[in-house]
Amino acid sequence: MSGGYNYADAYSRYRQGVSSDSDFEKYVDAKHGSYWKLIDAYNKGEDVDKKFAGKYKHPAGLSSSQQAEYWQKRGANSKAAFGRAHAAEDEALRSGTYQGGTKVKQWEGDTTFETCNKNKDKKKEYYQKNREVILAKTAARRLKKLAEASNVE
C-alpha cells in the first residue's frame, strides 16, 4: 500500500499471541455477525448493494459495497481477520491513535472486544470454580435419563 497508512498490516498484528483467531471469530458472532455476512458476500464477488439493499445503514451514508471495501482494506479476508481488524480499530479509536479522520472521541474503559473477552473469562472462571458441581449435576441428569429410559418398554 503506497502513500498511506497500512491498516491491514497494523491491524493483523493486534493481540497476536494473546488472542486466538477463535476469540475473534466468537467476537464477530456475538457482536458483528450481520456485517460479516455482508463482507463475506463481497469477498465472494456477490453484488452486496443489491443483496443487502436497505440493510446495514451506515452513519456516514456508505453503501454496502463501500462498507465491505472499507473493511477489506483493513484486512477482513476472513471472519477472524475481520474480528481482529474491528477490535484493533476500536482500540485505536479508544486510545486516540486512529490514523484516519474521525469524529469519534477517545474514551476510557473497555472496547467491545475486551468486554466480550472478559465475559468469556468470567464464564471460564465460573466453570473452573464450580467444575465438580457442574459435572456432578450433569452426571445425575444423565443417570436419571438412563433410568427413565430403562423403565420404558
Image (tube, helix red, strand yellow):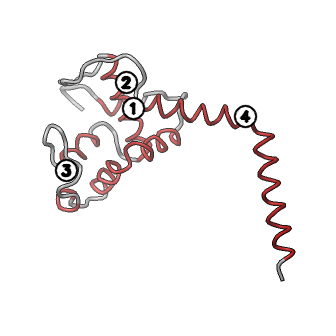
Query: What's the distance in space between the residues labelled 3 and 4, CA to CA?
Result: 44 Å
Task: Name the residue carrying label 2.
Answer: 91
- Determine whether label 3 and label 4 are within 8 Å by CB: no
First in sequence, mark 2 or 4: give its number: 2
First in sequence, mark 1 or 4: give its number: 1
**Measured from the top left, where is residue 81 in percent x and y?**
41, 41
**Measured from the top left, where is residue 127 in percent x and y?**
70, 37
Amino acid marked by disc 2: Glu
Task: Name the residue carrying label 3.
Answer: 65
Amino acid marked by disc 4: Gln
Task: Name the residue carrying label 1.
Answer: 87
Q: Secondary structure at mark 2?
A: helix
- Determine whether label 1 and label 3 are within 8 Å by CB: no
Between residues 10 and 86, which one lies in front from this camera angle?
86
Q: Secondary structure at mark 1?
A: helix
**Measured from the top left, where is residue 12 in percent x and y?**
40, 33
Q: Residue at x 50, y 29 (%)?
A: 16
First in sequence, mark 1 or 3: give its number: 3
Amino acid marked by disc 1: Ala
Left or right of 116: which side holds 44? left
Query: What's the distance in space between the residues labelled 1 and 4, CA to CA?
Result: 27 Å
Query: What's the distance in space between the residues labelled 3 and 2, CA to CA?
Result: 24 Å
Q: Secondary structure at mark 3?
A: helix
Of labels 2 and 4, the one closer to you: 4
